[in-house]
Image: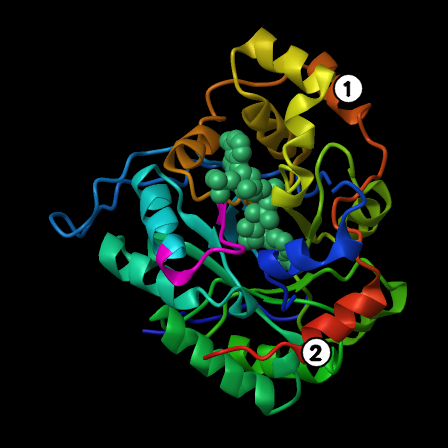
Amino acid sequence: MKHENKQSKTGAMGRRDFLKSGAMLGAALPLLAGTLSACASGGRGNAGKVLNAQVANVPSIKLNNGLEMPQFGIGTYSMSNEECKQACLEALRNGYRHVDCAYSYQNERGLGEAIKESGIPREELWITSKIPPTEYGEGKTLIAIDKMLKRLQVDYIDLLYEHWPIGDFVGAWKDMEKAFTAGKVRALGISNFDFIEEDFHAVIDSMKIKPVALQIECHPYAQRLEIRKKAKSHNIAVECWFPLGGAVSQGALFKDPVIKRISAAHQKTPAQIILRWHIQEGFSVIPGATNPNHIKENIGIFDFALSDSDMAAMRSLNKEKRFFTMPFEEVKKMILSRVLKD
Ligand SMILES: NC(=O)c1ccc[n+]([C@@H]2O[C@H](COP(=O)([O-])OP(=O)(O)OC[C@H]3O[C@@H](n4cnc5c(N)ncnc54)[C@H](OP(=O)(O)O)[C@@H]3O)[C@@H](O)[C@H]2O)c1
């Protein structure tokens, strides 16, 4: 059964591509004040078939269309289908209920298998995916969405992003609006619309359905103050990619002396301190992890809080230093030349 939508108005890039690109690394909103409600569940209503899922106290963010999205989830960038399946199953076992995927990651089938195998009722999950620019265009994007649903083995996607502001993203958005009306998608978002101001406004100001979220690189070294302010003024949630700096950062954030000091004080790992900072800033955060220990560690951030002075110390680390440094023109070329398998 498709989800009924009542609300109205209001990159095709894989980690391997990033890593391969020499241009990308030199060395390498608070918004919506997060309506906090316990969203985790232990797979009720499907006893016996459901994997042994723990309950995790993951809060939710109330989006501008009224939906509540788990504030924390797992990212799946650069995982093979099998890695994605195993990481998602491990995450679901540990209380995650939100998964961030994308057609360009070429692992939606792995996520689909994990959803099915988990036995967790579909309505207890928040599934995000992204349409790449090579699938943009009126008529074309709707077909791409139907194919995405098949790969994911679901009837609807909770949040569908335009992955990059490249090509006919206006035509694509019109098709995404149609998919929303048809109940195939519950919310629409924009990803990487932080390069060119007009692109952000082309969607925000002119389209019938407003984005609920903006996905951007954001972590303690690149806190993205300007774009966060802009998103907040439009009541758009900010979701952070590379929250731990991404694989390309080679753990740079974990070695930061301030983060290490706060980590020791709370007896939490640097990764947990960083992710807790994201949560307290009001972001949605989707750390990627394939290592089961990382998957468990990352969700262990809902049993402590950073103090005001910890938060101030974390904020002082901002130097707007992004770890993804590929010039936009190169990103465009790379994305448009990439052939994706169904
Ligand atoms: N919209 C976009 O264009 C875009 C771009 C990039 C990413 N994303 C999304 O955002 C998600 C997050 O970004 P990301 O995965 O690239 O980067 P990330 O979450 O900042 O970092 C992932 C890396 O950190 C490691 N890691 C995870 N937890 C750890 C821990 N507790 N301790 C030490 N290392 C840890 C992972 O290793 P293991 O795998 O070994 O566990 C992996 O190498 C992606 O997965 C994807 O869903 C979106």
Ligand 1 closer than 8 Å to label 1 CB: no
| x 39%, y 53%: residue | 83
Q: Earlier in the sequence, mark 1 or mark 2?
A: 1
Q: Which residues are magenta?
A: 74-82
Can the viewer see residue 287 in this picture? no
Is disc 1 placed on a helix, strand or loop? Answer: helix
Numbered badge on residue 312: 1
Of 277 and 221, nearer the camera is 221
**Percent x, y of residue 255:** 67, 22
Task: Give, as a three-letter code, the residue at label 2.
Answer: Leu
Residue 336, which numbered label?
2
Q: CA distance from mark 1 to mark 2?
A: 41 Å
Q: Quadrant of residue 206?
A: bottom right
Name which residue lies at 52% across and 45% down. 288
Q: Quadrant of ligand 1?
A: top right
Residue 241 is situated, as x and y percent measured from the top left of the image, at: 64, 48
Instruction: State the image quarter where residue 229 is shown.
Output: top right
